[in-house]
Amino acid sequence: MNELGKIEPDWIAVDWGTTHLRAWAMSNEGEVLESATSEAGMSKLSTGAFESALMNIISGWLADGEITPVVSCGMVGSRQGWIEAPYRVAPCEPIDHSPLTRAQTTDSRIEFYVVPGIKQTSPADVMRGEETQIAGLLAQEPDFDGVVCLPGTHTKWVRISAGEVVHFSTYLTGELFSLLSSKSVLRHSIAQNGWDAIAFKAAIDDAITKPSTIAARLFLLRSEALISDLSPETARARLSGYLIGLELGAARQYWLGQNVVIIGDEKISGAYYSAISAQGWAPKKYEAQLMTLAGISSAYLKIR
Amino acid sequence: MNELGKIEPDWIAVDWGTTHLRAWAMSNEGEVLESATSEAGMSKLSTGAFESALMNIISGWLADGEITPVVSCGMVGSRQGWIEAPYRVAPCEPIDHSPLTRAQTTDSRIEFYVVPGIKQTSPADVMRGEETQIAGLLAQEPDFDGVVCLPGTHTKWVRISAGEVVHFSTYLTGELFSLLSSKSVLRHSIAQNGWDAIAFKAAIDDAITKPSTIAARLFLLRSEALISDLSPETARARLSGYLIGLELGAARQYWLGQNVVIIGDEKISGAYYSAISAQGWAPKKYEAQLMTLAGISSAYLKIR
């Protein structure tokens, strides 16, 4: 902080996803001096609007006559983002020695860099942002060998070995839950909050052991509400259990007999933790934002 | 038709669902004199708005000083509709000797009746409208013994025996397809029209034989579009195949070894026909509106 009380970060870390923008003012020693967030996610911005959306939240941290590096990850590097950062191809390190992608800026006080995502050719799959969280995990646990589950709108299961992303698989589970609970006929029967842990575990079991029956169980959440007073909280837990259970069944090769780590927000990580541990596994949990920041910090070392 | 060229129906048939309102001016001999439709479905109307929405399309058919019976089916009889027509309980005839539910009207030129829906207590399930289409089928084929598949937003499979609805099961397949293809991240990769029959059949097979893997295949429709140029038409057919295939797997007890009839609109019936016949069954198809009208005509006989 200078004599006017203004902070003077050495660099700025940015997590720029589909729906949110988060920035951290960082010192070279890894200290977070300040942070800021906005709703200006990639999906809300046209190509020319990215720089001003960023400046809205970081300009107070910039000093005239100095260049502050900004290192970002996430959908900002997609074709619909600020600048397309070409995918690297798995198997590869989550962040490797290839250069970061740089976007041109009109404001000369920053240099803006994007961490590239990773693609897999067969089966086809892509990630943007998760590679940075995995790099954050490996910065803390360099010898980690196992599977990372990153639950969210599009949950990813990622096999890590010898410091590399070996292969991965993406599930629409979070988006399906959101669409079914808020846009489908089930919305009339499903609480926005509340939980029923017993119903959740039973639904997980049903979906893992009898996946072929789940299509018949979804409408039950509506009809049981209509004719047998199913509670909206139980309906919420059952819907979540059916969808996460279908995912666990399809992703079985990722978690069965593996060393599993969950990286996510506390709420969604808790549901996955309870689902996986009910299968007899005890995953470790890491907080998503901490891993993101640790990963962006690794990327910053490449341009420092 | 009278001397002024105005039609004079003996009664009016109405199909009033969640999204549409359809009316037919009928003679006692079963002739359709005229028909009218509007977008005033149940979901767009508040309680007091039903009568005027109906009058908007039928008032030209009414004669002063005469009472024209109006017989309707569908969601108009739900709790959110014009008047709640209490469910009958399966097993029962699709339309039986219990009275139709009558709504009060301010206009004395009509008497408005609703065909009640059917509920099943275990597993919980409900129908409103499909019972009328099934009554229409039985009016044409009184000895029908087998299974009726009624594809749509909420597809129903109904076991019919000895003239009764024995049991049934509802699937969200149509609504899931609509949400995933127009509201999820997959919308970027899925055509609004177009088809790929080979991809559809392969997807059906995958979903029936390996239901546990389908959760992992949905995001492929996005990632294959991004990195291996999957065509939007093929993606559309595959999504439809995965979802219908999951339904067929869950509903196997309904169609396997059974005499199956499909009642639906031509487009959706065609997809189900091709999916079921690929499993070695050859269902018969009936057009949905014709069955609806035949069923409402059976109900009209009760009050005539």
Image (spheres, coloured by chain):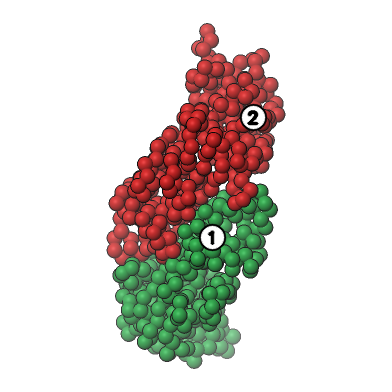
Chain colours: A red, B green
Instruction: Estimate how packed mark 2 is, as few (under 14), some (14 to 19) or many (20 or more) residues with alpha carbons within 10 Å.
Output: few
Q: Residue at x 69, y 21 (%)?
A: A108
The reply to whether dot 2 and dot 1 touch (C-beta < 8 Å) is no
Residue A97: numbered disc: 2
Q: Residue at x 54, y 69 (%)?
A: B38
Depicted B184 relative to depicted B60: above or below: above
Residue B158: numbered disc: none
* Quarter of the image where the C terminus of chain A is located: top right
Q: Secondary structure at mark 2?
A: loop
Query: Which chain letter matches label 1?
Result: B
Tag nearer the camera, 2 or 1: 2
Q: According to the image, label 1 marks what residue?
A: B178
Q: Residue at x 44, y 44 (%)?
A: A258
In this view, the residue in front, B236 or A58, is B236
In this view, the residue in front, B283 or A61, is B283
In this view, the residue in front, B297 or A87, is A87
Query: Which chain letter matches label 2?
Result: A
Q: Position of residue B254 (x, y in %)?
A: 43, 75
Q: Residue at x 33, y 68 (%)?
A: B123
Depicted A50 relative to depicted B156: above or below: above
What is the quadrant of residue B233 in the picture? bottom right
* Amino acid, disc 1: Ser
Instruction: Estimate how packed mark 1 is, as few (under 14), some (14 to 19) or many (20 or more) residues with alpha carbons within 10 Å.
Output: some
Residue furthest bottom in the image: B29
Q: Secondary structure at mark 1?
A: helix
Q: Please give left or right for residue B93 compared with residue A48 in the image.
A: left
